[in-house]
Structures are given as C-alpha cells and as structure tokens.
Image (tube, rainbow, N blue to C red):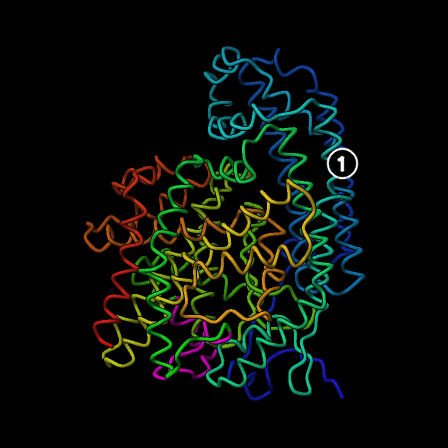
Amino acid sequence: MIVYGQSASSSTSEKLGDLPEWDLSDLYEGPDAPDLKADLETLTTEAKTFQKRYEGHLSSLEGNALGRAIADYEQIQELIGRIMSYGQLVHARNVADPIVGKFYQSLQEQITGISTHTLFFTLELNRLDEDSLKQKLTAPDVQKYAPWLRDLRAFRPHQLSDDLEKLLHEKYVSGRAAWTRLFDETIADLRFPFDEKALTSAEILNLLTDPRRPIREQAGLSIGKVLAENGRSFALITNTLAKDKEIEDKWRGYARPISERNLANFVEDDVVDALHHAVKDCYPRLSHRYYKMKARWLNLEKLEFWDRNAPLPISDDRIIPWSEAQDIVLSAYNRFSPEMANLGTRFFKAGWIDAPVKAGKSPGAFAHPTVPSAHPYLLLNYQGKSRDVMTLAHELGHGVHQILAGEQGHLMANTPLTLAETASVFGEMLTFRSLLEAETDPTRRRAMLASKVEDMLNTVVRQIAMCFFERELHDQRRQGELTGEQISDIWLKTQKESFGDAIIIREEYRYFWAYIPHFIHVPFYVYAYAFGDCLVNSLYAVYQNAEKDFAEKYLDMLRAGGSKRHQELLAPFGLDASDPDFWKKGLSVLEGFIDDLEDVA
C-alpha cells in the first residue's frame, strides 16, 4: 500500500524537536477575517478616490502637492501589499488545497481590479518632462521620494500607452499568474515513489544528500522518472511563459530576454555578461576540479548525478535539532553584531517562521518581506541537515535585511535581487566562519570546508549554469516552440559544461530543470545568487581587515533598502562591481578553498 509522506520519519521528527509554524495573525486572523473584508472595501474606495483626484492633473501639481499624492499612493500600495502578502503566505503553506487556491486567486483578481484605478499614476509620472520634474523635486515632500522616482523612470523608455499598460495589467491574472499557479500546484501534487512511500518533492530531494549511495540512487532515479512523466506539462508551462515574455519584451523594446531583469536589478548588461563569463571561464578550476577530487574521496572513478551533493565519509551526518540550529545561527550573527542577532531572535520568538516539511507545502525556502507596517516571514523545509542550518542562516539574512530596509517606507524598502542575495549569503558566511573558527579537529575542519565549497559551487557555478540554460532556452524559444526533449537537451548541455567529465549525466537527469521554480516565478533570477556570493567574498575580505565600524557600515547598507544603487552602497567598502577584476577576486576565494582541500588531500 502507498503511504503518503507528510514529513520526515517519526524518529527524525523527534530528533528535530518542535518546529515552529507561522502565526499570520499579524496580517489577518484568517481568510474570513472581518478586517480583511473591511480592508478590501476601504482599498476599493480609496483607489477610486485617488484616481478621481489625481488622474490627468500631475503635471499641474506644485511640488509639495505632488509629494502628498505620492504619499497617498504609497499608503494604497502598502495596503495592497499587506493583503496580497497574506494571500501568498496562506497559499505557500498549502499549495495543494483547492480551497486555498480559490482564496488566493480571488484575492489576486480583486486586487488587480482595484489597482487598475491607480495604474495611471506611475504612467503619468513617467510622462512628466525632465525640467518639470526637476522643478518639483525641489520641494521637500517630493525630494524624499527622489530615489523611487529615479528607479521608476529607469523604465520610462519601455513604457507603453496607457491602454496597453492597462490591458497587460488586467490580463496578468489570467496569463502569467495563472500559469505560475499551475506550476506551483503541479509540483505540490507530485509524489515520488520510494520504497513503499510516496514522497513530496522536498522529501525526495533531501534524500540526494543521504550518506547511503543506494538511497541516493533510488531517489535520483525516482525524481527523473516522475519529472519525465510530467514533462509535457512542464514543457507547456515553460514554453507559454517564455513566449509571453518574448511578446512583452518585443513591445517594450528590450534588447535581450535578460535585459528586463538586469534593468530591475539596476545592473548593466555588460556587467552581468562579465559575471557569467568569468564564472564559466573558471569551471575547470572550480567545479571540474572539485568533483574529480570528491569522486576520489568517495572511492569512485566518477560521480553519478545523484552523488553530486552526497556527504563526504568524514562529514558529520547527525541530525541537528531546531534549537541547536537556532543557537548556531544567532551566535554567529551576535559575534558580528548584537543588533543583527536581536533582530534575528524576533523571528524565532514571534512566530515568523514556518519550518516543518508538510504535504502540499511550497518546497524550498524563502523570506517574504510583506510590508513595512508588519514584518517578514520565513518559509523553510527543515530536515536537520547542515545544509538546512545554512539555509536558515541564508533566509534569516534576508529577513534582517527586510526589517532594516523597511525604515525606507513601502515604496523604497525593496532592493534589487543582487543586493538582496548579498545580505542572505553574508548571513551564511558569518555562520560558516563562526563554526570553522570554533572547530579544532583537522578532519572535521576539512569536512566543513568541503561542505562550504559545495554550497559555494551550488551558489555560483550551478546558478550561472542555470542562467546559461535560461538564456539559450529563451533564445531558441524565439525561433518556435520547444519540445520537452529540446528543452532537456539545452539543460544537459549547460549542466555538462559546468560539471565537466567528473559527473556522469544519465538520461534520468534530463528533466531536472522542470522542478526549479525560479525559471517560472522570476526569469533570470538565478544569477543574483552568484552576484551576491562573489560580492560577499569581497565584503568579507574587507571585514577581516576592517576597523570596528564595519558592522555599522554593513547595517547602514541594509537600511538603505532601494534608496541607493549598488555603486553607492559599496563605495564605503572600497568595492566596485563594474570593475572587470571584481568577479575574479570573488571567485579566487572559492578557488583558494579548493586549493586548500587539494593540498590536504
């Protein structure tokens, strides 16, 4: 009889201890909460009033009056953010429940209808000529929003007519959002046969880190089989969203499929290209070299794809209880900055984390900022591995960043993905360095260093390889629809380039692209991880040689939110991501770790 896996085994669950679950009542008490209904009604009234008051009049408003209009708009957007954040978090906790899906879709449709009344505002702001806006910016009430206006107007060359913008806005819920929801619900519904159980994606992927090779092999083959059986659906979703992006890119005049993401990250195309090619040029010195070394450590001629994340024989494979994971991360944060640790502690004490693996729950992990008037929430699928501890450190880094950036207000709290991932990867690095410095046993130190190298390879090499996959997929899609096999061919090609000949890529690995949500949710997101990792390596080098005020400078960088661009944020640390040698310096840290491991081996 098939038994549906709901979480880790009972013995593992006992070792993990009590895992926290979200308390979303700081947003709303429940889907039927009276204050949620009242907020939707208030929002409808305020949006219509806002439209009646300001549409067609922005050019005639004097500076302070425009500032008050932006403040009114910010208040409306924050209420929209609160409502949709609640819907997203409820949905993430049980993607498979059709009642929850209906609730989330209903919210999306209502909010889309309401926000249609405020859509004119940003479009009209972008039509203001430079001289007129410059004059208005002399008023204090507008000046405070200058960074937001700067970023808004960066998209000015790609803005369409009001009617087309309204059409795209209203069709979003029946277009991209609907296909994204289909992907999420499909992944949540998948069950992967394993012995006499049917596991969720989070559970089966976790088995790829099991110390027992037959377990890893069985899990890898099961994943490949189930994804291939559903490959036609995943190919249709991927093709449709890539075509949707192509159409919008063409109308908006983006030069390349990746250009919109680069603009949203406020990083020039050539800077991103430099990152991609710097990493790819280092494949032989990084991933190819390390995986050959790992194969020797495992007494294998070559690794199979299911061995890539296998623990080393010298690794500590014990289950780490949740309480210990909390102490590890917060202690590392506290060594760097007590303020950072105090902010992190709030997540554990106030019910801002959802940690257990559950059937129907969104796989992976994320930090949701919600809105400045509330607080972030973290989603994990914690199973007690050392990588899970690092994931906690990563997402908590996001969470601390989001709290600090909230001081900028709703319109300027969000940061580009590249800087957001810098905060999270820095949290990981603090945790790793703290553990490494405390460890005195040479064997355990080598195991920890190897684990860190693998995490960095996953963050840098794997993410860049996945971005090359996206780039080629979107380029080929512009020549016509791709079959699942054609998409898989691109996947295998770009993966083999990054792995080298140390890893055997079998046919069962062909559809492993299908479960990765970043390709669906936020195209070209993935290079932000590599950007953040290389930047953190450089930042940490500054920290090691810095004066005592480094932590204050770092927290000030996080507090800036989206009010400053990366050049300005990094200037106090003497760093410049536009320098062609910048990426080489960041990658040299990873290469140095591999050198150290090779010397010991």
Question: In screen coordinates, is 249 left or right of 339?
Answer: right
Name the side, left or right, on which 339 lies relative to 197: left
* Range of magenta residues: 306-329
Can you give x and y, in whole percent of width and height, for residue 41 in the image?
78, 40
* Rendered residue at 42%/78% (across/down): 311
Residue 576: x and y in percent read 30, 39
Dot 1: what SS?
Answer: helix
Q: From what the image shows, is residue 150 above or below residue 372? A: above
Instruction: Tell me if residue 381 can be seen.
Output: yes
Q: Residue at x 34, y 35 (%)?
A: 568
Q: Which residue is mark 1?
A: 170
Q: Using the image, determine if residue 141 lies above or below residue 7.
A: above
Position in image of residue 537 (x %, y %): 31, 54
Q: Residues within 10 Å of mark 1 (few under 14, many from 20)?
A: some
Q: In which quarter of the view is residue 257 placed? A: top right
Would you say residue 50 sits in the magenta stretch?
A: no
| Quadrant housing the C terminus | bottom left
Seen from the viewer's position, the closer of residues 174 and 217 is: 217
In the image, 293 versus 204, the foreground residue is 293
- The answer to whether residue 322 is seen in the rendering is no
Where residue 149 sits: x, y (%)?
A: 52, 26
Q: From the viewer's perspective, is 364 left or right of 283? A: right
Q: Quadrant of the N terminus?
A: bottom right
Residue appearing at x 35%, y 72% in the figure: 292
- Is 170 or 77 nearer to us in this picture? 170
Under mark 1, the amino acid is Glu
Q: Nearer the viewer, residue 483 or 465?
A: 483
Residue 449: image quadrant is bottom left
Magenta segment: does it hold 327?
A: yes
Residue, x 64% and y 50% (percent of image)?
A: 85
